[in-house]
Structures are given as C-alpha cells and as structure tokens.
Amino acid sequence: SFWSIGAGWNLHQEKFLKDNTVLNTLRLRASMGPTGNQNFAPYQGVTTYRYASGANYRGLLGAQLLGYGNEDLKWQTNFKKNIGIDVNLYSNRINFAADYYVDNTKDLILGLNTPPSAGFSSFTANRGRMQNKGLEMRLNVGVIRDLEKNINWNVGITATTIRNKILEIYPIPINDNPTDQQLRDNSRYVVGGSINDVWVIPSAGVDPANGQELFLMPDGNYTYFPLPEYQIPLGNSLPKWQGSINTSFQYKGFTL
C-alpha cells in the first residue's frame, strides 16, 4: 500500500490580493508520500532457464540460463517530498510554475558485475539508499493574443536541475553456494558520491624528457603506467542544467 498527502494555498483568493488586477493565480502547494518502483524483470528474482530453440544437438533442445535469481530481491521504495508555486499574470498571458523536490530511495536496485565463468553477465540486488534533489521550472508567455484576427503566439521555456547522492551501500548478498561466491562488486558506488560519477585517471600531460604521458595517482605521485585503482571521480554525466525552448504560432486554422 502507498499513501500520499498534499495541500495547496490559493493566495490570490485572500483579501490582501483579491483586488490585484495583474495577478490571476498565486498558489503554493506541497505534497509527500512513498511510491514503489519494481525496475527489474520478473526472472531476476528467480533463477530461470529458457529453451535454446535456435540451436539443437542431434535433434535435442538445450537450455540457456536466462538469469541468476536473487530470492531476496524486492522493489525499491521512493519517498517523495515536493513544494511548488504557480503564478499566472496579465489575464494568464504569463504562466510560471516551479517545483523543488527531494526523493529518498531505499532498497536501491542496482546490478553487480559478474565474471564470465558465472554464466551470466550481471546479478541484480538491492544495493543501498540514495537521494535525488532537483528543481523544475516552467515559463510560458503569450506574446500575441489577438482574438479579432485569430492570431496567437506563445513562447515557452523549461529548465531542470538534479543532483544525486548515494547515502548507503548494502553488503553483497552472498550465500555458500559456488555461484554466489563468484559475485564481485566491480562497480563504482561510493557513499557520498553519485551513481552518475565519471571515474577517470587524471593526466598530468606529456613528460618532455621522453614523450610519454604521465598520470596522476591518488597519493599525488606520478606514473607512466595507469592502473584501474588510480581512478577517481572527476565529473558527472548529468548536466548541471537541462531544458528546452519552444514556440507555437497560430493563425486562424493554421498552427506552426
């Protein structure tokens, strides 16, 4: 079961704003509640085979491992909190809305990398807790609204920013069977970091003495031979801001 609760305050209906001729709508709102996200295929919870109908041996069918099941797998839960504002001005010719939200996710579903000898490429498990914070803004302006000539021109702008942070990493669920013993966590999940971090080995440029590239190790020293353990997070695959600009023009029955 999931629940949610929300509330809004129509400030434009209060006495101190009701006679304002410019302001049409000024609404404050907030909501909170959990949602579920299964985010994995059904066979990832139960070890499942499928018939290899495209390849037979002497007329007999074989079976391929579709996925190694995790019986402890459960869906992740997101607890969402949101506050927002809606503003409409000048007979609704200018419309603005903004939302700030905080999503806390527990039982985060992520994959584990597995060696080829295991017979499957990944293993799905509930790996930890994560937090997303973001701001969304939308602005729409009616540049021209001529009812007599049936001309309408609207311009809209949207902008979004989001930040991701890992709060906790659960231990790998390993049992005593040989297959579980092959599970390894080769992914880059660090508490305090982001699942969108870009891990690289920093370059210190070219050594003028021999023309070889130098790489910076985490301890501050230099090396000609970069190793995977020298990687550090130096960026994020999520842009700081993303958005769009759109426009529409309508003349009688024609719309562009």
Image (tube, rainbow, N blue to C red):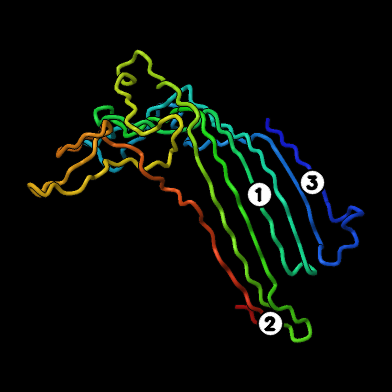
User: How far is disc 1 from disc 3 in space, using C-alphas?
Assistant: 13 Å
**Mark 2 to mark 3: distance in Å?**
37 Å
The spot of residue 104 in percent (x, y) is 58, 34
Which residue lies at the image location 80% right of the left edge and 69% below the top edge?
A: 91
The residue tagged 3 is 8
In the picture, measured across the screen, residue 209 lies left or right of residue 255, that is left
Q: Foreground residue, 24 or 125?
A: 24
Image quarter hosting the N terminus:
top right
Q: Nearer the viewer, residue 193 or 148?
A: 193
Give the residue at x 14% y 39%. 224
Residue identifier under label 2? 253
Relative image position of residue 194 (x, y in whole percent): 44, 38
Q: Amino acid at mark 3?
A: Gly
Report the residue at 31% width, 30% height from top: 114
For mark 1, what is the residue? Answer: 99
Q: Measure the alpha-carbon separation of dots 2 and 1.
A: 35 Å
Q: Nearer the viewer, mark 2 or mark 3?
A: 3
Q: Position of residue 128 (x, y in %)?
A: 48, 27
